[in-house]
Image: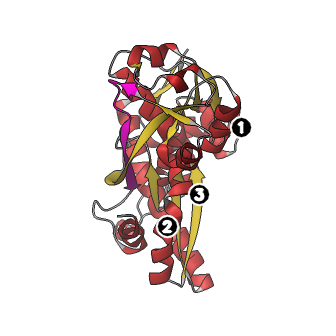
C-alpha cells in the first residue's frame, strides 16, 4: 500500500482478496474458501499469491491436509476482519442514506431464531418503527462467520463458547433434552436414568456439525471422554422432531423445540444422569467492546 503527498493513501487494500483470506482461515482450505466467496479455486490461488507478493510476507502455509495461516497471516486476518466489518457498515450506511431508513441485520442460530428472537424483536420494532430489521437464520458457526465478515450487525449463538474475534455476552440459558417416541424402550425407564456412557453408545438423531445444539451435546459428552454417535444428522430442529416422532432412535434437542410435543405426550423426555445438558445463549458482535447504535438496541431487547 503506497502513500501520496502528505501521507494520503494512493493504493487501497483489495477487500475481495481479504475476504478470501478470512474464508481460508475459517474453512482451512483454498478450495472451500473459494466456494464460500463465489470464485474458482485457480483464481483464488492466484489472488492469494498476489496478496503475499504485495504484502511481502508469507500468509499461508500449504500442506497435504489443507492450508493454515502463518503467524503473519493470522495478524493480517485479524486486521482484515476489522476492515471488512467497517466496509460492511459503510455499505449499510450508503443504503440507509439512499432509502432514508435505518437498517440492522440480525443473524441467529436456528433455535434462537425460531423460538426466542420473534419476541425479542417485537419491543425493538415498537421502540424503533423506522428501522428495517433483516433476520438471517443459520447454525451457530455460520452466525459467527456472518458477524465476523460484516454480513450481520449482531448475532445470537447457542454453543456457549465465545467465538474468536468477537465480543459477546450471555443473554439467556437453555437446556438440551433427550426425547423418544412413546413406544421406545427408554420411554418406560422412569426410575432408571440413562447414563453418559449409554447415551454415547446409542445412535442419536442430532443436528448437523457446527450447530449450537450439536456442539453443546459434544461438549457435554466430551467432559466424560465420550463422543456423539449420530444415527441421522439433520439441519433443523423441525426435521429432528419429525424424525423422533417416527423413528426408533432417541433425539437430542433444545427443550424450547419440543415443549409442545412433551406436553401433548407425542414425545417423552428421558432422564439422563451425570451429563450437564444446560448451555448459555450468547449475543456476539464486532467493533467496540461496548455495543452502540442499533446493535445496542437489539441487545437490550434480548436481555
Query: Could you tell me if the residues under marks 1 and 2 are in contact, i.e. CB atoms within 8 Å?
Result: no
Q: Position of residue 57 (x, y in %)?
A: 41, 35
Decide: few, some or many residues near mark 3? Use Cα within 10 Å; few <14, some 14-19, many ≥20.
some
Q: Quarter holding the C terminus?
A: bottom left
Mark found first going from the N terminus, 1 or 2: 1
User: Residue at left 46%, top 67%?
Assistant: 120
User: In the drawing, does residue 48 fall left or right of residue 291?
Assistant: right
Q: Main secondary structure of the magenta part?
A: strand
User: Residue at left 38%, top 34%?
Assistant: 277
**Highlighted range, magenta:** 272-284
User: Residue at left 54%, top 47%?
Assistant: 263
Residue position for label 2:
119
Residue 255 highlighted magenta (yes or no): no
Closer-to-camera residue (254/192)? 192
User: Residue at left 56%, top 49%?
Assistant: 110
User: Residue 271 falls in which quadrant of the image?
Assistant: top left
Residue position for label 3:
136
User: Residue 103 falls in which quadrant of the image?
Assistant: bottom right
In the picture shown, does residue 79 fall above or below 52? below
Mark found first going from the N terminus, 3 or 2: 2
Q: CA distance from mark 3 to mark 2?
A: 16 Å
Of badges 3 and 2, the one in the foreground is: 2
Say how the picture is coloured.
Answer: secondary structure
Residue position for label 1:
40
In the picture shown, does residue 103 fall above or below 267? below
Q: Position of residue 302 (x, y in %)?
A: 40, 64
Closer-to-camera residue (192/85)? 192
Closer-to-camera residue (140/234)? 234
Q: Is residue 14 visible?
A: no
Amino acid at each position: 500500500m503506497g502513500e501520496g503527498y502528505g501521507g494520503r493513501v494512493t493504493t487501497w487494500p483489495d477487500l475481495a482478496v481479504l475476504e478470501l483470506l478470512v474464508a481460508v482461515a475459517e474453512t482451512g482450505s483454498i478450495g472451500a474458501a473459494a466456494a464460500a466467496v463465489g470464485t474458482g479455486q485457480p483464481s483464488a490461488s492466484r489472488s492469494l499469491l498476489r496478496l503475499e507478493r504485495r504484502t511481502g510476507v508469507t500468509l499461508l502455509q500449504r500442506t497435504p491436509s489443507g492450508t493454515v495461516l502463518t503467524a503473519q497471516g493470522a495478524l493480517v486476518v485479524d486486521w482484515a476482519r476489522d476492515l471488512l466489518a467497517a466496509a460492511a457498515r459503510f455499505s449499510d450506511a450508503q443504503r440507509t442514506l439512499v432509502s432514508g431508513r435505518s437498517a440492522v441485520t440480525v443473524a441467529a442460530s436456528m433455535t434462537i431464531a425460531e423460538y426466542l428472537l420473534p419476541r425479542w424483536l417485537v419491543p425493538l420494532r415498537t421502540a424503533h418503527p423506522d428501522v428495517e430489521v433483516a433476520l438471517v437464520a443459520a447454525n451457530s458457526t455460520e452466525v459467527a462467520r456472518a458477524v465476523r465478515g460484516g454480513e450481520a450487525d449482531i448475532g445470537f449463538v447457542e454453543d456457549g463458547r465465545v467465538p474468536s474475534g468477537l465480543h459477546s455476552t450471555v443473554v439467556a440459558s437453555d437446556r438440551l433434552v433427550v426425547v423418544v417416541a412413546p413406544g421406545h424402550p427408554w420411554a418406560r425407564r422412569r426410575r432408571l436414568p440413562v447414563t453418559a456412557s449409554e447415551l454415547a453408545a446409542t445412535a442419536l438423531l442430532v443436528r448437523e456439525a457446527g450447530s449450537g445444539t450439536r456442539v453443546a451435546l459434544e461438549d457435554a459428552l466430551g467432559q466424560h471422554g465420550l463422543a456423539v454417535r449420530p444415527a441421522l444428522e439433520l439441519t433443523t430442529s423441525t426435521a429432528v422432531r419429525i424424525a423422533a416422532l417416527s423413528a426408533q432412535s432417541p433425539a437430542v434437542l433444545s427443550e424450547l423445540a419440543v415443549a409442545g410435543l412433551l406436553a401433548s405426550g407425542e414425545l417423552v423426555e428421558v432422564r439422563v444422569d451425570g451429563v450437564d445438558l444446560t448451555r448459555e445463549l450468547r449475543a456476539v458482535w464486532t467493533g467496540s467492546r461496548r455495543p452502540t447504535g442499533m446493535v445496542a438496541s437489539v441487545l437490550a431487547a434480548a436481555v
